Amino acid sequence: MSKAGVNQTQRCAWSRCGAAAGELLRESEARKYAAKWLYAAPWAASIEESHAPSLARDAALEQHWREAGALERAFAKVCGTAGADALRACLQDAALRSAPAAWL
């Protein structure tokens, strides 16, 4: 959903989230964890593609998704958002707004 198609309440929630997320993303550890959460699905696919089926691969995937869930809950609490889509949009927007020009 584009920002143009959202109501005022959603815009306010994104604005509050964006400020909190922007502050959070100034910390390098938080950026690392945000990237891990934002790219959880491709990360899991990489684990599956890089390792033969085994109990160890299954355990690695289980741990990966458990960590991704914990990160989502933590970021949602800090940013005050509910739902993965809202949190993803907020973190991505904050990352773009707080990125040094050299990154873009």
Image: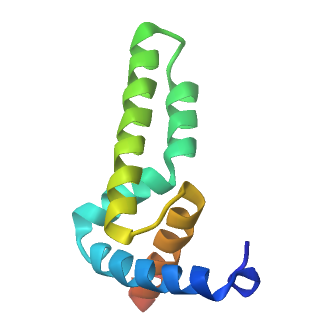
Query: For the view shown, which residue lies furthest in the right direction?
Result: 5
Q: Nearer the viewer, residue 75 or 35?
A: 75
Q: Quadrant of residue 100?
A: bottom left
Q: Look at 51% across and 80% down and name the residue there.
A: 14
39 versus 18 height, above or below: above
Q: Position of residue 26 (x, y in %)?
A: 27, 78
Instruction: Tell me: 45 left or right of 16.
Output: right
Percent across and percent down for residue 88 are 53, 63
The number of numbered discs placed on residues in the rendered structure image is 0
Is 3 on the left-hand or right-hand side of 57? right
Q: In the rendering, at what x and y percent does residue 96 appear?
A: 49, 81
Look at the image and tell me in which quarter the N terminus lies: bottom right
Residue toward you, 2 or 100: 2
Q: What residue is shown at x 45% (from left), y 26% (from top)?
A: 61
**102 or 82, nearer to the observer:** 82
What percent of the width, then of the height, locates residue 56?
A: 39, 13
Res. 19 visible in picture: yes
Q: Is residue 42 above or below residue 64?
A: below
Q: Please name the colour scheme applied to the rendered image.
A: rainbow
- Residue 101 against residue 30 in the figure, above or below: below
**Can residue 99 be seen at all in this image of the molecule?**
no
Question: What is the residue that sits farthest to the front in this orientation?
Answer: 9
Residue at horizontal 40%, vertical 61%?
76
Q: Residue at x 43, y 8 (%)?
A: 55
